[in-house]
Image (cartoon, grey):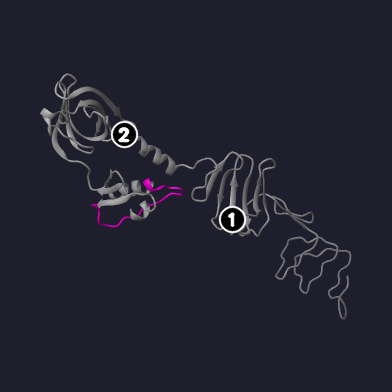
Amino acid sequence: MNMALEGTGFTVGTAQFSGYVSIDLKEGVNARGVLMEIAAQTGCELYFDKYTVSLLTRRGQDRGVQFRLGKNLKGIVKDVNGQSGEVLTAYEIGVVELNTLPEFEGLEYFELGDTVDIIDEELGINEQQRIIEYSYSPKRRINSKVTIANYIEDIQDTIYRIQTTTVGKDKWRHGVKIGPDEGIVIERYDKMARSIWNADEFRMQKGNGSGSYTDSIYFDPINQEYEFTRVVRAGKFIGGEVQIGDNFSVDETGHMKAVGAEFSGEIRASTINGGDIHGSYIECASIMGSFIRTAPNGERIEL
């Protein structure tokens, strides 16, 4: 917490958590975001007192305070949220702070985080929940507004969650940027590799470390073709045809055409047709040709 608040003008007050936790910080997170993550991972709650921030196991207490219609409860609005699968209930209420009146000083005193009872016989409400929001006039602290809930996500927490779990337009996060010009761009921190994905292109590029890139793999969506500019290694290739330049090809039946070839092992075939066939050892069921010579010179048989 001290590191997070360094240079902000805020200081650490009480820290009631004494263990160790690991936190995952996103790019661009501010000091408040760090504190929110610490609180989430420790299960504690933050308490701000002017420029002092404390980490408490629980804010507030149960003082036996009641908000009751006809006593100190002026109005009530009930909010129910069941989208998460768990029913989340909150009450927004207007209260009269009796403890601010001289004749009731100290009566029904409450603070943010306290557990209180809310009672309205006409609406059939009798529940005990915590105060999660508290607003009042600094001039005359009498008619205040309080929100109590079993849980409702604070709007600031929602904004923080959106900021730390989404990628803004043309903003980098974990090496990923999404923008209208290039689409999705994924780049290594050392600029040695980059990928570009969008509806019109797919590129995997090699970088030189200074921001210059050349394609290693490129997909042409118009011709439905992949182009590889570097070495391709694979355990097996499965496909229809192989075409290398204009002088070598293999069709879907396995028929190969080549201008020339060198083989260091054996060649076995049922039929070999060609102009000239040279070899130190040729074995086959039948040999057909206009001229057959068993050796290039010296003793030999010519047919």
Residue 6 image point, x, y percent: 37, 53
Q: Amino acid at mark 1?
A: Ala
Task: Name the dominant secondary structure of the magenta segment.
Answer: loop
Residue 296 image point, x, y percent: 86, 75
What residue appears at the point 83 percent right and 63 percent down from the top-left corner?
288
Which sits earlier in the primary sequence, circle 2 or circle 1?
2
Label 1, on which residue?
193
* Residue 100 occupies quadrant: top left
Circle 2 packing at 10 Å, graded few (<14), some (14-19), many (20+), is: few
What residue appears at the point 25 percent right and 56 percent down from the top-left corner?
18
Circle 1 packing at 10 Å, graded few (<14), some (14-19), many (20+), is: many
Relative horizontal placement of residue 265, taking residue 86 as reference (left or right): right
- Between residues 83 and 151, which one lies in front from this camera angle? 151
Vertical position of residue 114 compared to residue 145: above or below = below
Residue contact at pointers 2 and 1, CB within 8 angstroms? no
Q: Residue furthest bottom?
A: 298
Q: Which mark is drawn over residue 25?
A: none
Q: Which mark is drawn over residue 85?
A: 2
Verify whether residue 152 appears in magenta. Answer: no
Q: Residue furthest top?
A: 122
Q: Secondary structure at mark 1?
A: strand
Residue 290 image point, x, y percent: 89, 64
Relative horizontal placement of residue 219, taking residue 130 as reference (left or right): right
Q: Amino acid at mark 2?
A: Gly
Q: Which residues are magenta?
A: 15-32
Circle 2 or circle 1, nearest the eye: 1
Q: Secondary structure at mark 2?
A: loop
What residue appears at the point 88 percent right and 73 percent down from the top-left corner?
302
Q: Quadrant of the C terminus?
A: bottom right
